[in-house]
Amino acid sequence: MVLMLERVPVSLRGELSRWMIEPRAGVFIGTVSAMVREKLWELSCQAAKGGSALMIYSTNNEQGYSFQLWGEPRYYPEEFEGLLLVRRSS
């Protein structure tokens, strides 16, 4: 699971660092169960306070991953003919 946060409180980043590593500011990586993943996603969306969140996780599809998006990030995934690609907001 990869969770990318933009413009969120430092306290949220601290809470997430208990479950995953943060190799760069606002980027969290970890292996958690589906239940924990959903709880962390709920926490991230509730505590973002005007920021944005993007979660990418493994699933059983052609690309092997899926995503969830909350808020308005600068870069966001967009489906194009069945593939997820990244687009920069204008």
Image (cartoon, grey):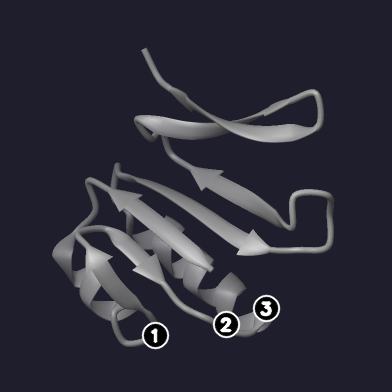
Binning the other alpha carbons within 10 Å of mark 1 as few (below 14), some (14 to 19) or many (20 upward) gives some
Disc sitting over residue 19 in the figure = 1
Q: Is residue 12 visible?
A: no
Furthest residue in direction left, as rendered = 10
Which of the two residues, 46 or 5, is positioned nearer the viewer here? Answer: 5
In the rendered structure, the answer to whether residue 52 lies left or right of residue 68 reads: left
In the rendered structure, the answer to whether residue 79 lies left or right of residue 9 reads: right
- State the SS at label 3: helix
Which of the two residues, 12 or 56, is positioned nearer the viewer here? Answer: 56
What's the residue at 21%, 76% (across, down)? 14
Q: x, y (%) of residue 24?
A: 22, 61
Amino acid, disc 3? Ala
Write down the residue under mark 2: 36
Q: x, y (%) of residue 37?
A: 57, 74
Q: x, y (%) of residue 21?
A: 32, 78
- When the figure is inspected, residue 78 is found, relative to residue 54, above or below; the finding is above
- State the SS at label 2: helix
- State the SS at label 1: loop
Amino acid, disc 1? Trp
Locate the N terminus by quadrant. Answer: bottom right
Binning the other alpha carbons within 10 Å of mark 3 as few (below 14), some (14 to 19) or many (20 upward) gives few
What's the residue at 29%, 42% (across, down)? 50
- Do labels 1 and 2 touch, CB within 8 Å? yes
Disc sitting over residue 34 in the figure = 3
